[in-house]
Image: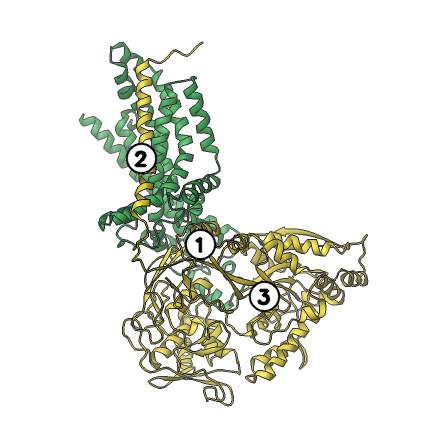
Amino acid sequence: MAGSSASLRAYVITRVLLMVPMLLILLTFTFLLLRVAPGDPVSAIYGEKGNPQVIDQIKRELGLYDPLPVQYFTYLRGVFTGNMGTSIVSSKPVIQEIQDRMPATLELTISSMIVASLIGIGFGTFAGTRRDRPGDFGTRIAATLAYNIPIFWFGLILKLIFGLWLGWLPVSGRFSARLNLPPRVTGMYTIDTLLSGDFRAFVDAIAHLILPSLTLGIVLAGFFIRITRVNVIQSMGSDFVEAARARGIPERSVFFRHGLKNALVPVITTMGLTFALLFSGAILTETVFSFEGMGRFVYYAISYRDYPAIQGAVVYYGILMVVISLLIDIVNAFVDPRIRY
Amino acid sequence: MATPEQPTPVRAGSRRLLAIVAVVVVLLVVGGAAAYVVLTAPQPSTKVLVVGTTDDEITFDPADAYDYFSGNLIQNTMAMLLTYVPGTTNLTPDLLAQVPSLTNGGISSNELVYTLHLRPGLKFEDGAPINSTVLKYSLDRVVKLNGEPAFLLGYIVKTQEYWNIPGDSGNATKKASAWANYTAQGVVIVDATTVTVTLRQKWSPFVSLLAFTITAPVDPKSVRDDKFYPNVIVASGPYRMSSYLPHQRYELTANPNYYGTPAKMSRVTIVRYTTAVDLKLAMQTGAIDIAYRSLLPQDFASFKTNSAVKTQEGDSPVIRYLVFNMCSAADATAVRPVPSGKCPHTTVFSDSTGKLLRKALAYAADRADISSSAYSGTVAPLYSLVPQGMFGHQDTFKTVYGAAPNVAAAQALLTQAGYSTTNKLSFKLWYTPSHYGDPEIFVAQALKRAWEATGMITVTLDLKEWTDYKAAWRGGDFDVFLLGWFPDYFDSDDYVFPFLHWASGGSASFGNWYHNSTGSSSMDALIEQQAATADLTQRANLFAQIQSGLSADVPYIPLWQTKQTVVSKPTVSGIILDPIQFFRYFTISVS
């Protein structure tokens, strides 16, 4: 046991140390890619009514006249001291722009992943245990349809049905305009309304999340269903399941304790990475439901060539990906000892 | 080989798992919906006006704000020095006691010194006084920070000298000296409520600037003069910004320290939607009381036939026009005294033959088709760069080229220029697909239709996204292209100077390179004269000459003037659609 714990610790330390060069490579590529891209960001933003003096001053303030190595080290120093610069478009610190939008993305990501995981694992398991039977065919067709459905269109249809025709759910936004906003603690209304003890507002926040999370969740579920199905089939046909059966373990226990548990390891890894991907924002879902999240932030930053904003978003996203990958690796190493060796 | 059947308990287990999932998802959806419908039904006591928009804020700092929505929120929360009589373009005092003029002594006889008298007893929302010290601080801060709109104060004496010195450490002494010169001469405190502003040359639009957000006083206690404050509003106007969620929601509550008529509603919530479709749905579902800026034209047309809502239309200062690149051989080689430099290549629209072509296209343009096919009739045709409702406006293009397309006249000019049905004039018309909204493609198609109706023109449509579009037109890559304009300040000068004044680089900055700049009757001279003239009759005469020159030379073809459209619930009253597009939340109430 002591050896096992030491190997896990060594593995975790190695993975944590590897994060440093990974982040440095990411930061360097982000910096270089934006500099070699054609076009001057300040002139692009101030084009129509550009005052040359203002443009010149902003370029100087952003250090765009400095030599590239100087710009690079200034940029690195900023990142490591938590200063991602100031957005050219809004004059606001990039970190604040990200903080403003992060709660919307977090709420959408978490709720969509709940929907996608429930449907994906439920239907994937259902199909996997009925291989090549009608239930399997039906589920596979539904999964393919769900995964290929245009999310923009799907969102609009749900809005029309549940929002406009039935009037059951709000069509867009994160909170009713007629209610008072809860005091900001996390920025996530579902949590802040609970913390403030306002149940009515909590229900309102949840109701605003239902359609966006169903839209994104169902589309993602199409992917999860297929992965779960394949892994359930593989797992239930593997030697360890046969061995469990041979030992006389009841079939239900074989399925839940051995087959399904092992089938879900790769599924959880995929879900974790998808979860991380969603943190960068789901631009289409955000746009359809008027969620001002990270996806729209990145889209506008790129559209306006807002260098500091793009850099800030990529750094934030890169750090998130690296950290989540690390967590997934640690969880996998914990579950499957073969990984640490 | 057939797949072996799975044992039944497994399928039963998976079915149970699926059933649990289905129950959880259905419970979430139906339970959430039911709770939402029951618990969040509007309360009769709720007194809030909810306005929906697709506009987004950038900054609330008057020294840096230069976009419509930021400016509009500033206008509703920070009183300006002057404002406009609702529904008109007539200036009236706001924080100032009077509109400066020659007759009341607010403008000196040489028209260089403006005396600004503040009303007594003015306060910010926090009780801090608004006096001459605050006013000087606010104007000086704009000059010092040199934000995006600061150039508008460039006629104040010594501003240019200060701005022209680089801000690096090597020039610190010179910069400090220039700053001392500016602060001593530019804005000077006379007494507790009076300052004077001295201009370096006559510039009559300066009075209009006093109604623009750039001159709004800011609270020195909350806003330092060495950086921008994009998130801070210390109110001096009818509302205060009690809270806001950037890019999503803005809460306004009545400002108890406002000197003027209190706002009609104690609370206004402005909700931002990311798409026009969401704005429409919000109006349809009753989530908002007012939908303003910007519904799709077809959606507004649909609301007009809906008796459950009220619709209003009003003039807007936004104009749309066609730009010709008039770069000639002489222009392409000349060293220009402008930031945009030389034009890169000659075009068919330059020189005397080019003039015939520009006139032919002006004759053939069909504004009615643009209005109906692209905007469902929600825009007004425009026959001058100075829009309807602005001082000195004249429909000169209508007089010269007619209100409807004149194909015969266009054909005659094309023939004179050497083109025929077998030797057609061929060019690309450029547009940008999203910056001006979805209808832009239909505008381009309508123009193509109208011009090709002559039988002597072939038009190819091409597009670029906005960032690339801007770079391309300024670089002279386009020969003919579509643009739009929202004025910096509400004076007709801002519709001619930037477009037609050659020496300042105005026409070059539009990728147009038009110049008629020599002699006392040149376009440059006329524009300079009107800007230096306070006498309204004389100024109107100068504007008539400028617009006449515009229609004679056709460097641009004015196409249409947008209209403001607003949809509201029948319970809403007090909406005023100003020609300057100052949307006042404080006059609106909902019963």
Which residue carries the number 1 mark? A307
Depth check, front residue: A291 or B479:
A291
Q: Nearer the viewer, mark 2 or mark 3?
A: 2
Q: Residue at x 46, y 88 (%)?
A: B104
| Mark 3: amino acid | Ser
- Name the quarter where the N terminus of chain B is drawn: top left
Q: Is residue B425 above or below residue B263?
A: above
Rendered location of residue B534, percent (x, y)? 54, 84
- Please identify the residue farthest to the left as the structure is shown: A2
For residue B509, the mark is: 3
| One can see residue A152 in this view | yes
Same chain, marks 3 and 1?
A: no
* Label 3: chain letter: B
> Which chain wears green?
A
The amino acid type of the residue labelled 1 equals Tyr
Bin the neighbour count of mark 2 within 10 Å (Cα to Cα): few under 14, some 14-19, many 20 and up.
Answer: few
Separation of disc 2 and disc 3 at Cα?
A: 60 Å
Residue B391: percent from left, percent from top: 57, 76
Q: Dot 2: what SS?
A: helix
Camera-nearest label, 3 or 1:
3
Place residue A88 in its image quadrant: bottom left
Mark 1: which secondary structure?
helix
Most foreground residue, A164 or A173: A164
- Say which chain is yellow: B
Q: Which mark is residue B307?
A: none
Q: Which quarter of the picture shows residue B524?
A: bottom right
- Mark 2 is on which residue type? Leu
Number of residue marks: 3
Within the image, what quadrant is residue B411 found in? bottom right
Q: Chain of mark 2?
A: B
Residue tagged 2: B27
Q: Chain of mark 1?
A: A
